[in-house]
Amino acid sequence: MDTDDSRADGRRQFLKCMAWAGAGTLWLMKSGVLQAQPPGSSSAAKDATFSFVQISDSHIGFHKAPNPDVVGTLRRSLAMINVQSTRPAFLLHTGDLTHLSKPEEFDTLSGVMQEARVGRSFYVPGEHDVIGDNGAEFFRRFGEKQSAGGWYSFDQDGVHFVGLINVLNLKAGGLGSLGADQLAWLKKDLAGLSAETPVVVFAHMPLWPLYPQWGWGTDDSAEALGYLKRFGSVTVLNGHIHQIQQKVEGSITFYTARSTAYPQPAPGDGPGPGPLQSVKPDALHRYLGIRDVRHVRVGGALAVTDEVMA
Amino acid sequence: MKRWMVMACAVAFGGAVVSCMAADVASSKNKPYEVAIQNFAFSPKTITVRAGTRVVWANRDEEPHTVTSAGNQFTSSKALDSGDIYATTFSKPGTYTYYCSIHPMMVGTIIVQ
């Protein structure tokens, strides 16, 4: 890998390659700057110390246009993971497992997820998973139980992973919320880490004001990002908006993921963020997919690849 | 119904301002008032009803929503899937703010007189 790119060059490269996003581009992240390479030409895969995969927004229970078979598309997403040459260390599901938080929807999700050949799976809830019970059913089945609030962290080969919850205790008129207790925990959780530690933060709703008019943001994310600023490499993985959006801010790179169920409109396109019903059945797969992330030995970079459903 | 009109008249004699307010209130005590949930908004966003009015919300979006009382002032709905309805009766005067717990930017107000 090129190691003498100046930051400005890296930024130009990032802008140049934005057009490739969603076409299977391999993203390499180094010191907070994204670099893109065409798929298949990278040495990242063989250099990888480990890899993990992100899926999001499976919305089990949804049954209308443009996807009457969300169980089927979740299965196809997991099949994409299972054909990979190296088994991912783990899977992150960034929320909205279900559509309506119903026990039978959680049952279905649990059953299908058994098909994923991954080391293990980590979950954070979406707002669709906590309807009516503040997430009791979700946490009982999928919670990590590290803290009373359900947030957690773990380490994998020197990379620190933090799972945050921003879909509870939402206020009328507000966006996603982390809350004072979680922010205090995050500050403490990160305090002992050196600035060289790569950090990956994942949560359902975007942790930056992506499109607040549609609720695509988190009210108190700025405080959380304040604690992350000192780290040389921070990757933030979110779901919620059923499409890929990316942003670089200093050493922090933000990504939202595709859904395994149905796409939503681009920010501000139409009256609201409902399912994109106009998508024809034979085109649906182009809007759905998974995300692979490989941790590369050289320079501690993370290579991020989005794969659309074939 | 008759009794209410008598009261409204009495108030009208007492003060023009109060009588104007009474005129804006939903006219019939027995008729439920419908609020549509459409395009990620409650419509109308603010309604004024008489005490005892039943308010019915109908979800006309392709996305689930909830009717959640801010501050737990009235019984909140469960998840309302597309086409579902929720109804509750407001018996005490007051201002009731509610929102969708799934999309909290959706806010509505019910003023009960």
Image: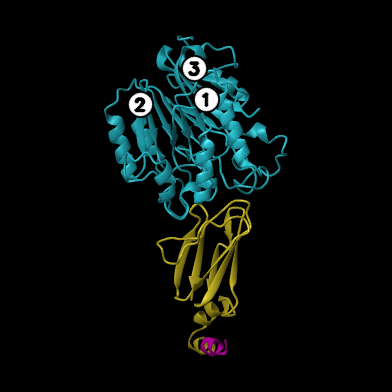
Chain colours: A cyan, B yellow
Residue in the picture at 59% in, 73% down: B32
Relative to the observer, which residue lies in front, B38 or A116?
A116
Q: CA distance from mark 1 to mark 3?
A: 26 Å
Q: Is residue A74 left or right of residue A301?
A: right
Nearest to the observer: residue B112 or residue A191: A191
Instruction: Look at mark 1 in the image and give the residue it sits on.
Output: A292
Depth check: A61 or A304 in front?
A61
Residue at horizontal 68%, vertical 43%? Answer: A66
Q: What's the magenta region?
A: B1-8
Magenta part, dominant SS: helix
Q: Are marks 3 and 2 on the same chain?
A: yes
Q: Amino acid at mark 3?
A: Ala
Q: Nearer the viewer, mark 3 or mark 2?
A: 2
Location of the C terminus of chain A by quadrant is: top right
> Residue A82: x percent and y percent?
55, 25
State the CA–CA distance, disc 3 to disc 2: 31 Å
**Residue type, mark 1 in image:** Asp
Residue that label 3 marks = A8
Spot occupied by residue A204 in the image (x, y as percentages of width and height): 47, 39
Mark 3 is surrounded, within 10 Å at the Cα level, by few (under 14), some (14 to 19) or many (20 or more) other residues, namely few
Query: Which of the marked residues, 1 or 2, is nearer the chain's N terminus?
Result: 2
